[in-house]
Image (spheres, coloured by chain):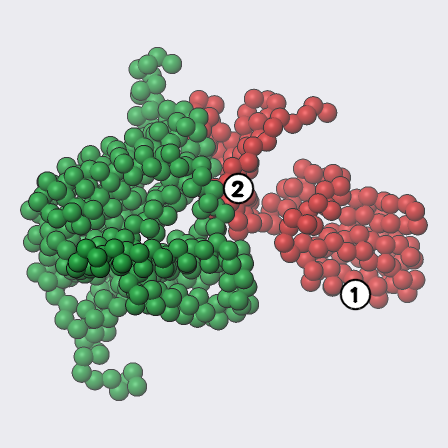
Chain colours: A red, B green
């Protein structure tokens, strides 16, 4: 995997922070992180490299979805760092008791994400960790689900998975 | 109470209604023409005042108070835009461009003041008026033209912040110069005003987090009442000791940060829009429209010179940041617009009875600059293309 060239970071007072990512194709990508959580992606013009040629505006939710799609399995590694950086984002460990309704059922059955907005990023079983489990991953009694989401979402998910 | 109101109150309501509707029509025209609303609000004020098309009788007192609130809200919101770190960071990165900006853009104003035969204080005010770009207009234009992500934009924003900070120091000094009588008193007044601003600044930078925590509330209503109450109280208190309340309101805004600032901005925006419009109208009311045409040539000449000097400093700052020619032209032209701060300065000068002609010159000047600035910057790219084509690159 070729290394990414240096990403520069420029504060935009009153707006947020802009990141410049020079791509190996020669194009330059800009990411503007608004303080409101909005994200904008820019491509700069070829003739005039200081001007934005095209832009895409993402709501905070859309930004997360796109990041998910681009990030994939690397998500888990960066989570611990994220937790310290992002306000309002929490990580928790939910242990499934034998009495849980979802023992021997799949993640898709539990519909955790659509019901609570919380993502299950890993499942710990004994000494074994299943990173980024798919929707057909089957829970067993004593599993610990590593979840990421808002504190409220996690509270709901906890009561969902443990009863 | 309201239903039983008699006497002047119904008349005042009718007059206020007329004023707001005139503003609404003016604002729509501005929108359609793609220009800033500030010049049209000023024109509306000119037509409604003494010697204008329609004369207000009883609503004037209310509008005068509303204008005071408008200034406080304008600066409070400006302070909310920036955090303490951003201010200090901008001061550091754009120090040289900032100083050059003062030299290039205040000098023509001061010189013009002397050429018009005004005293030193009035000339100093005109220097301030020609110096400071309109953060409000520039931010709006950057947004509308999709330039927020452009690489020259940080240079533009840093310069604007630098100017706003210079104003935080200039305003108290100028205001004390305007009211003071003897030389000894002037020095004391200036010292008190500066000390008040320094204390507020220190609190804003040092205790911003604590202030934000005390102020914040999950209820928008309570947040609004707390912030407005605090801003009015502190601004009024500062006025009592001779420091301009508006500057202290700016510092209250800077002290608030994080989520508290974010949400305060949302709840205050409609109020700011209303009272800022009232403020521009009030300034228009204070100026006799008949006095504007006679100073138009002077104002136009000043506009041409200070548009050029502003373009120069914007281009210089962008060049320091390694920006190419088209970006430099965009940065220079977008800064041309002058607006709310210039009118605030002119308003103080008028209130202190400094120089009768100053109001008319400032009104004509801001009318030109706030209209021309946003239009001018749209030509930056075509001009750059032509220049580059000619140089054969």
Image position of B20 with respect to B113: above or below? below
Q: Can residue B314 be seen in this snapshot?
A: yes
Image position of B388 with respect to B382: above or below? above
Residue drawn at (47%, 42%) of the image: B89
Q: Nearer the viewer, residue B130 or A160?
A: B130
Instruction: Residue B307: name its quadrant.
Output: top left
Q: Nearer the viewer, residue A116 or B343?
A: B343
Left or right: A160, with B294 as reference point: right
Residue drawn at (79%, 44%) of the image: A132
Left or right: B117, with A153 as reference point: left
Q: Position of residue B229 (x, y in %)?
A: 41, 70
Task: Classify mark 1: helix, strand or loop.
Answer: helix
| Residue ID for mark 1 | A159
| Residue ID for mark 2 | A17
Q: Nearer the viewer, mark 1 or mark 2?
A: 2
Instruction: Residue B311: name its quadrant.
Output: top left
Q: Can residue B261 be seen in this snapshot?
A: no
């Amino acid at each position: 995997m070729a290394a990414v060239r240096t990403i520069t970071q420029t504060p935009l007072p009153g707006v947020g922070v802009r990141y410049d990512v020079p791509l190996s194709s020669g194009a330059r990508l800009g990411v503007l992180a608004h303080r409101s959580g909005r994200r904008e992606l820019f491509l700069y013009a070829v003739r005039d490299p200081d001007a934005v040629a095209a832009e895409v505006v993402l709501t905070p939710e859309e930004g997360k979805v796109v990041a998910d799609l681009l990030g994939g399995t690397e998500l888990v590694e960066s989570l611990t760092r994220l937790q310290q950086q992002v306000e309002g984002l929490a990580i928790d460990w939910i242990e499934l008791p034998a009495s849980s309704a979802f023992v021997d059922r799949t993640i898709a059955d539990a519909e955790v994400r659509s019901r609570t907005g919380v993502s299950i990023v890993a499942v710990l079983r004994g000494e074994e960790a299943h990173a980024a489990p798919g929707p057909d991953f089957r829970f067993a009694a004593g599993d610990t689900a590593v979840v990421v989401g808002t504190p409220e979402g996690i509270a709901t998910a906890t009561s969902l998975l443990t009863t | 109470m309201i239903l039983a109101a008699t006497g002047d109150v119904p008349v005042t309501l009718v007059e206020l209604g007329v004023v707001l509707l005139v503003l609404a029509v003016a604002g729509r025209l501005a929108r359609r023409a793609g220009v800033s609303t500030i010049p049209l609000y000023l024109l509306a004020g000119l037509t409604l005042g003494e010697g204008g098309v329609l004369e207000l009788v009883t609503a004037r007192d209310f509008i005068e108070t509303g204008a005071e609130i408008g200034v406080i809200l304008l600066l409070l919101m400006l302070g909310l835009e920036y955090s303490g770190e951003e201010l200090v960071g901008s001061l550091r990165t754009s120090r040289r461009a900032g100083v050059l900006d003062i030299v290039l853009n205040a000098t023509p104003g001061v010189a013009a003041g002397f050429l018009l035969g005004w005293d030193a204080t009035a000339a100093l005010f005109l220097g301030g008026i020609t110096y400071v770009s309109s953060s409000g207009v520039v931010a709006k234009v950057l947004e509308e033209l999709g330039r927020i992500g452009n690489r020259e934009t940080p240079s533009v924003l840093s310069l604007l912040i630098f100017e706003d900070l210079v104003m935080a120091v200039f305003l108290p000094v100028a205001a004390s110069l305007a009211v003071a009588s003897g030389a000894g008193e002037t020095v004391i007044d200036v010292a008190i005003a500066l000390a008040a601003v320094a204390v507020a600044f220190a609190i804003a930078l040092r205790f911003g987090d604590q202030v934000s925590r005390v102020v914040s509330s999950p209820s928008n209503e309570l947040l609004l009442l707390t912030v407005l109450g605090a801003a009015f109280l502190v601004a009024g208190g500062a006025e009592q000791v001779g420091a301009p309340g508006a500057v202290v309101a700016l510092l209250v805004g800077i002290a608030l940060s994080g989520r508290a600032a974010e949400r305060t901005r949302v709840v205050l925006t409609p109020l700011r829009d209303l009272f800022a419009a009232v403020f521009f109208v009030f300034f228009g009311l204070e100026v006799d429209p008949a006095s504007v045409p006679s100073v138009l040539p002077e104002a136009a000449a000043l506009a041409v010179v200070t548009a050029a000097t502003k373009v120069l400093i914007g281009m210089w700052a962008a060049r320091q940041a390694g920006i190419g020619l088209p970006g430099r032209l965009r940065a220079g032209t977008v800064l041309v617009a002058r607006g709310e701060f210039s009118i605030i300065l002119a308003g103080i000068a008028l209130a202190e009875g400094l120089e009768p002609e100053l109001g008319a010159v400032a009104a004509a000047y801001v009318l030109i600059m706030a209209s021309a600035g946003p239009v001018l910057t749209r030509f930056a790219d075509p001009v750059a293309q032509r220049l580059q084509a000619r140089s054969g690159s």
